[in-house]
Image (cartoon, helix red, strand yellow):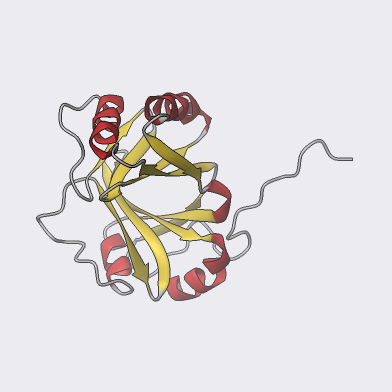
Amino acid sequence: MADQIARQGALEGLLKPETSGAGDGTRIEELADVTQRQIFARNGQSDALAKAVAGFLKQKKPLGPLQGGERGGVFICAVGPREYWVVAQGRSAAKAMQELEKAVDALASVFDQSDGRFVIRLSGPGADGVLARGTSLDLQDPALPAKWGTHTQIEHIPALVLRRASNGTVVFDVSVPRSYAGSFVAWLR
């Protein structure tokens, strides 16, 4: 009997890490070992939750609409009036994630979305162009913050798009329900 079942990526065998969506140097890869949490403010706790999230991020002001922030490998984005989405990758972010959950415990309901979703990272000079082909989001809008995230649809597939920095480069992390893995890869190709 095996001690533990090996976790398989949603795109196992469907997408190779070096696959390019447009032949323009865009890198597309599935991120492994990603923790995703959806946080909803409890009734009457929206302001307190916003302050707790700002405190975790060590910011003076709460996150504005769509705005994101990062600390200790944990990326948090205000994706709705009472909703935050949290993405953390790797074991090094586990301590920061525990600290965040402790800070918001009495103020919010926290839902683990990790097993039901997968994350694809698009990076490189044409990453925004690849995404623009499937969504109505204006990815070049100067009004958007440097780090942001929002719920949208990409070619009729429900998705959460996060714009952030990785190693000094702008990347787009796209979180999609696992049941859409095949459809999403078919669209990418």
Q: Give residue 131's position: percent from left, percent from top.
A: 32, 66
Q: Nearer the viewer, residue 105 or 21?
A: 105
| Among the 4 quarters of the image, the one containing residue 42 | top left
Q: Which residue is at the far right?
A: 1
Q: How many marks?
A: 0
Left or right: residue 143 versus residue 8 is left
Q: Nearer the viewer, residue 13 or 37?
A: 37
Q: Is residue 17 visible?
A: yes
Q: Give residue 5's position: percent from left, percent from top.
A: 75, 44
Name the residue located 29 percent from the left edge and 47 percent from the top edge. Answer: 82
Q: Is residue 23 visible?
A: no
Q: Which residue is at the far front?
A: 44
Q: Give residue 114's position: percent from left, percent from top.
A: 53, 47
Q: Is residue 65 above or below residue 51?
A: below
Q: Give residue 70's position: percent from left, percent from top.
A: 30, 34
Q: Nearer the viewer, residue 130 or 174?
A: 174
Name the residue located 54 percent from the left edge and 63 percent from the top edge. Answer: 15
Q: Which residue is at the far left?
A: 142
Left or right: residue 98 versus residue 51 is right
Left or right: residue 80 versus residue 155 is left
| Among the 4 quarters of the image, the one containing residue 138 | bottom left
The quarter in which the N terminus is drawn is: top right
Name the residue located 47 percent from the left edge and 26 percent from the top edge. Answer: 98
Q: Is residue 116 above or below residue 156?
A: above
| Among the 4 quarters of the image, the one containing residue 135 | bottom left
